[in-house]
Every structure is written in C-alpha cells, then in structure tokens.
Image: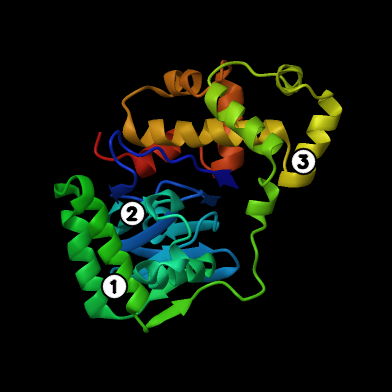
C-alpha cells in the first residue's frame, strides 16, 4: 500500500483537483478527502468496505483511511468508460485548535470524527449544492476560499442522509504505525531523498542507530521494510510523472531514483500490477 504525499499549490492550504481518470492504486494519505464522482463507474474499496461507485456519488474519507477506486473502463480497456472525479484534500491545520470545543465548529468536528469510517452521502440536493460550490471554489482567494470549504463541510455536517462505510471493528492502525518520531523522521528522510541512491547504512548513521535495530523497529511499527517504503515513494512519484508529464519512461525512471530500467519496470509492476507503458496508456491526461 502506497502512502501518498500530497503537496498543495503555493499560497493554498488545501487542494481542489479535477481528475479525468483515477490514477492511484491502494493508498492512503494524512489529508481528509472529499470525492465526487463525475463520470464512469467501478468498484470502490475503503478499508474493509466495498461497493459500486457511479456518477453523483459523494464520499468523505478520513485521514489515513486506505482506499482505491477500480474503474470499469480500465478493467475493460475502454477509455469511454474511464471514471473521473473532483476532490478536495485538506488537513486538520485549516481548523482552529480544539475546534470541537467551539460551538461554531462542533458539527464539523463531529463530521470529521465520523469520516474515520468513511461517509457516503445520499441526499441528491445536498450533493448537487456541494458540486456547484466545489466548481467555483478556485475562483475565490484568501479567506473567501477557505470559508467556502467551511460552508461545504457545514452542509455535509448537517446532513442526516448518509452511510458510514467501514465496519465499527475496522481500524487501519496506520496512525499507530507512524506515531513515533523516529518512524516519521525516517519516512521524511526517504521522501526528501528518494531521487538519489540511499542505503540502509546511510539512514542508520543519519539517525544514530544500529542498522539491524533500526530495520527491526521500522518493520515492527509499519509492517513493511524501509526499502519497501522507499520503493513505494519512488513508484508513487513515477505514477504522477507518467500521467502528467511528457518525459519518456527512461527519464521517469531516473527522475524517480532508479538507475536501472529493468529494476524500475520490475518494481513498478510489483506495486501497480501494470508496466509503466501500460500505466501511461491508461492514465495519461491528454498530453
């Protein structure tokens, strides 16, 4: 599973993005994500929950809740059935500290708490209203833009027509896995240096740990090796370049930290189940 690192545009504390196609495999990120399906259909996987998605679906996914959209158009290799969506991604940092204690934000705080299980909204008038607001949000600037997001969340917080997606027993445990400073610092180091050669000895020396001890601790907390995390970061970056740039596959491999094209192809297919060329053909955005 890929841990996606989302970078907002300069001068913005949250992102509104229009996707012509879904481009990410099974993944998670620290951002909350509001997703509205605008075309196509397929299977949706959220934690331990699975259903069919279609045009007009609106869901709010909590921070670090794993998810994946399998598009029917990709399964059938039919571009006319590719699935598109609009999303808003944001973190807790856009809200006041201890917002649950503020009467004005209490309903939104409760909404975000429910979103830990994923929320599917089922009231068409509210969904239509949210879609209209999403589509003009980028025409706003400064406080008006973030106020528009608050208004969207307030509408959803007051809605009584919704379904919680994952089971009560489900827990991703991702927050626990990445809760200590050492794990966070190692992951940050990987993300900041993935384009260059990185060795376990180098990482161990950086943080003053014995290599074996560091590797055991990291795997115990994250259920994966340090090198597996590095490969996921590199392949996640390669996915973005394949769908959004004109670089050839050899250049993309190099930009993603691989100096051996065969290794790049092998790692890419192991994580995405597709070759780089097949991924680009399926997900390219009108380059």
- Residue 3 position (above or below residue 157): above
Q: Quadrant of residue 69?
A: bottom left
Residue located 46% across and 31% down the image: 238
Q: Nearer the viewer, mark 1 or mark 2?
A: 1
**Observer-nearest of 91 and 104:** 104
Counting the numbered discs, the total is 3
Disc 1 crowd rating (10 Å Cα; few below 14, some 14-19, many 20+) is: some
* Front-most of residues 176 and 239: 176
Decide if residue 164 is in sight here.
Answer: yes
Measured in 3D between alpha carbons, the distance from the residue under mark 2 to the one under mark 3, in whole angstroms, is: 32 Å
**Which residue position holds label 3?**
219
Q: Where residue 155 is drawn, which disc sits there?
A: 1
Say whether residue 143 is left or right of residue 232. left
Q: CA distance from mark 1 to mark 2?
A: 15 Å
Q: Tell me where residue 108 appears, x and y as whole percent.
A: 39, 68
Q: Which residue is mark 2?
A: 88
Secondary structure at numbered mark 3:
helix
């Amino acid at each position: 599973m890929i841990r996606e690192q989302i970078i907002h545009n300069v001068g913005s504390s949250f992102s509104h993005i229009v996707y012509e196609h879904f481009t990410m495999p099974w993944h998670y990120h620290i951002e909350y994500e509001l997703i509205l399906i605008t075309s196509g259909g397929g299977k949706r996987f959220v934690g331990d929950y699975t259903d069919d998605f279609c045009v007009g679906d609106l869901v709010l996914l909590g921070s670090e809740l794993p998810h994946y959209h399998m598009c029917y158009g990709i399964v059938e290799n039919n571009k006319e059935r590719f699935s598109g969506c609009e999303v808003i991604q944001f973190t807790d940092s856009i809200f006041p500290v201890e917002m649950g204690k503020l009467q004005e934000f209490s309903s939104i705080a409760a909404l975000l708490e429910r979103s830990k299980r994923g929320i599917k909204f089922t009231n068409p008038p509210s969904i239509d209203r949210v879609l209209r607001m999403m589509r003009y949000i980028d025409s706003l600037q400064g406080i008006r833009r973030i106020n528009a997001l608050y208004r969207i969340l307030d509408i959803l917080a007051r809605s009584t027509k919704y379904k919680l997606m994952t089971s009560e027993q489900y827990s991703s445990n991702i927050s626990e896995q990445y809760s200590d400073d050492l794990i966070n610092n190692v992951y940050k180091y990987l993300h900041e240096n993935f384009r260059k050669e990185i060795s376990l000895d180098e990482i161990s020396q950086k943080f003053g740990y014995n290599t074996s001890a560091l590797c055991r601790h990291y795997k115990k907390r994250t259920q994966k090796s340090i090198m597996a995390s590095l490969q996921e970061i590199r392949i996640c970056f390669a996915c973005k370049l394949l769908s959004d740039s004109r670089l050839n596959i050899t250049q993309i491999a190099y930009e993603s930290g691989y100096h051996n094209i065969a290794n790049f192809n092998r790692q890419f297919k192991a994580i995405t189940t597709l070759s780089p060329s097949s991924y680009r053909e399926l997900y390219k955005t009108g380059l």
